[in-house]
Image: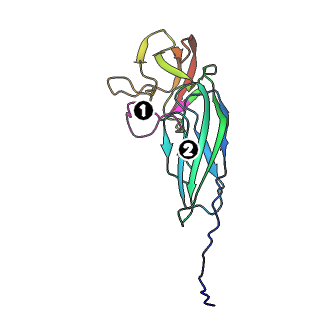
Amino acid sequence: MDSTEQIVLIHQNPQALFDAYPREVRNLKQLIKFVNSSINSSEYLWDFGDGESSRDENPSHVYREEGIYTVSLYVRSEHNCPDTLVREKLINVLHGEGSTVFPNAFVWNGSGPTGGNWGENAIDNTVFHPHLENAVKLHMIIYTRWGEMIWETNKVYIGWDGYLKSGELVQPGVYIYKAWVTYIDGLQELLTGDVTFLH
C-alpha cells in the first residue's frame, strides 16, 4: 500500500473590527475618526456610506450632508484572506444649530498686513474673527467709537488684522464690530459688540 505525505498550510483568517468617534455630530464640518482594531489584516478598504472610501488603516472623514450612514470595512490578510464588517446606521449627522462667538481682544502681529486670512482650526489672536459653527456666510464691519466705518469683509475666512485697506495700522484701543451671519439651515443673526486692539 502506497502512502504520501503533504504539508498543508492553514492561515488564520483576518477579522474586521472598528469603531468611530464621535458617532453623532451636529456640524457638517466635524471630523469623524475611525479606529481600526482588525486582527491579522494588512489591507483595508473603507466604505463610509456616502459614496466616499479610503484605504487608510485609521482614516478620518467629514460627512457633507445630513443623514444616517452605514459604514463598511473590508480587510485582507497578507495571505489574501478576506473579511468584512458592516455596521448599520453607525453615523448620525444632523444640521444642528449654528453659533457665533467673538473674542473681546486681539493683538498686533508685529510685522505688517496679512490680509486677515485665518484657518478653521488655527489659533491666531492676531486676526479678529468670530468662531463659527455651521455658518456659510459672514458680512462684518469694523467702526471706530465715533461710528466711522474703517474695515469690511464679506468672506467667512477673512478677519481683521488691525490694518486699514490703505495699509495703515490703526491705533490701539476699542473698536466696534457689526456682523451678519447666515447659517447652513438658512437662519440669519446680527451680532454687535466691541473689541480691544492691543499693540
Please tell me which residue lies in front, 14 or 176: 14
Q: Residue 110 in magenta?
A: yes
Q: Residue 60 in magenta?
A: no
Q: Secondary structure at mark 1?
A: loop
Amino acid residing under circle 2: Ser
Q: Which residue is mark 2?
A: 60
Q: Which residues are magenta?
A: 106-122
- Would you say the magenta stretch is mainly helix, strand or loop? loop
**What residue is at 46 percent from the left and 33 percent from the top?**
118
Q: Position of residue 115 (x, y in %)?
A: 38, 31
Circle count: 2
Quarter of the image where one finds residue 167: top left
Residue 62 visible within the image:
yes
**Mark nearer the viewer, 2 or 1:** 2
Amino acid residing under circle 1: Asn
Residue 178 visible within the image:
no
Residue at the farthest front position? 1
User: From the viewer's perspective, is 168 left or right of 17?
Assistant: left
Q: Residues within 10 Å of mark 1 (few under 14, many from 20)?
A: some
CA distance for labels 2 and 1: 25 Å
Q: Which residue is mark 1?
A: 117
Q: Secondary structure at mark 2?
A: strand
